Amino acid sequence: MTLTEATGSAAGRGHEAAAAAGLGAVPGTVPTDALPAGRVPYAVPPAPDTIDPEIWPGIATVPANLKANLAGRTAAAIFKAAVRRLPIQVRYPDGTVLGKAMPAGHSVPVMIINRPGAFATRLGDGGLIGLGESYMAGDWDAEDLTAVMEVFAARVGSLVPEPLQKFRALYLPRQPRKERNTEKNTRSNISRHYDLSNKLFASFLDSTMTYSSALFPATGAALKNVDWDSLVDAQQAKIDRLLDKAGVTKGTRVLEIGTGWGELALRAAERGATVYSVTLSSEQQELARQRVAEAGYADAVSIDLKDYRAVEGEFDAVVSVEMIEAVGYEYWATYFQTIERVLAPGGKVAIQAITIAHDRLLATRSSYTWVHKYIFPGGVIPSVRAIEEITEKQTGLRVRERLAMGDHYAQTLRLWEERFMGRADEVRAMGFDAIFQRMWLFYLCYSRAGFETGYLDVQQIVLDKAPAAGYRGKGTKA
């Protein structure tokens, strides 16, 4: 397999389920007693001194042009000014410690700057892309990466002075046209993430191979302490709630947009439904078909490698779990119009969607971020308002019910993080190097910080068709 910056590593193939996570103190920077109660300690692999530029062209060398150097000096000044007023401790190699003064006995997250010059240059040259790349390169570390990212996520709109935000927008990168989610490009975008390796995903997912937020029975403070053994039931509870809301019972014709690794299709088939599921990931299709066949539901479940826009037929229920984020905001109307087109009279729709506040959507929908470059090319997270406005103005679908469960996603991500890092040796044996592992850790912690702070949420949304008398065509209401 050719190595690329997007995937970071060649990878083996396989369908093995993950084993128990190993334990170990984080070497050099993260003492076990620095972790919050209930957290499983793990070792963070250090970045190598020499990074292969053919595998990681954006990480191996620090930008050295005049623009990057000037931007780096500006970024260093902005960063230091920002962290002086934040509840964080930033430690520099020369002994300098920056951060807001806190009362005695009050602990704050610790960020360790290993290479100040490289860190500032990457940050100035790429903004948030540079923040992630500098972590991958080892320019900085953290005692608790999620806690550090929470400090920044909670203040993301104010870290950079507003006039400079407008200036930076003039030169920071925009999403490449080749990553727009046209029918031509979408397969490639999906493959860059979901076709990394089934074995990689099995290293941190539970036995259901469910890669979306679970729904735990715990709430409040108890939710913070859910453990790995509760994850399977919580994932199945999430799926069962969606199937219930979509009215899936014996004889129901179900369309699933975005197969994952087949758990929802299996649980729908167990109810006596027939399922047509579409995916653009060949790796997911292979394993999902295998699981369906092994469970004895091959006659009830069909899984095709197909773009959602190409689906034909009529279905009593349409279910889609955390797939809308990969659609691209230009195509959200097409996504819901496709669902409306195939939904039978009286049918219901149940989707699970990561969401963002509407003002942040408007501010970031055209941005090109670290997540786009390294994790989800072409992805855009919708707002609830965007979903409601698009369905009301451009379809006959209407949102009838919502359940917000972002705090459950934060804990789902915590369990994935601990599982993944606890199996670092096995992940390395698959062909995923230390830079990839740091990248994946940054992705999991970056995401969890978004849910912990409320910057991100996840919703289960139920829709159906508006009554005929109240709908006169796309874009009009009675």
Image (cartoon, rainbow, N blue to C red):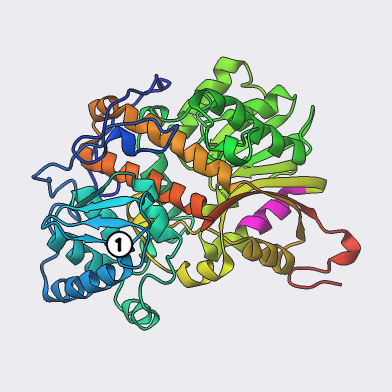
**Image quarter of the C terminus:** bottom right
Instruction: Identify residue type, mark 1.
Output: Gly
Element at label 1: loop
Where is 436 relative to 106, above or below? above
- The residue lying furthest to the right in this view is 469
Which residue in the structure is indicated by mark 1?
99
**Image quarter of the N terminus:** top left
Where is 133 relative to 78, above or below? above
The residue that appears at 18% across and 46% down in the rendered structure is 55
Q: Which residue is nearer to you in this view: 360 or 429?
A: 360
Where is 324 relative to 164, above or below? above
Question: Residue 244, how many percent across, how many down?
Answer: 76, 36
In the picture, measured across the screen, residue 399 lies left or right of residue 120, that is: right
* Residue 230 image-quadrant placement: top right
Query: For the magenta stretch, what is the residue range?
Result: 335-343
- The residue lying furthest to the front in this view is 104
- Kindly tell me whether residue 68 is visible in this rendering: yes
Dot 1, crowdedness within 10 Å: few (<14), some or many (≥20)? many
Q: Which residue is nearer to you in this view: 469 or 312?
A: 469
The residue that appears at 33% across and 32% down in the rendered structure is 421
Residue 183 in magenta stretch: no
Where is 15 relative to 116, above or below? above
- Kindly tell me whether residue 326 is visible in this rendering: no
Question: Residue 166, how many percent across, how many down?
Answer: 37, 81
The residue that appears at 80% across and 45% down in the rendered structure is 347
Magenta residues, dominant SS class: helix
Question: Residue 342, how many percent across, how many down?
Answer: 72, 49
The residue that appears at 63% across and 26% down in the rendered structure is 266
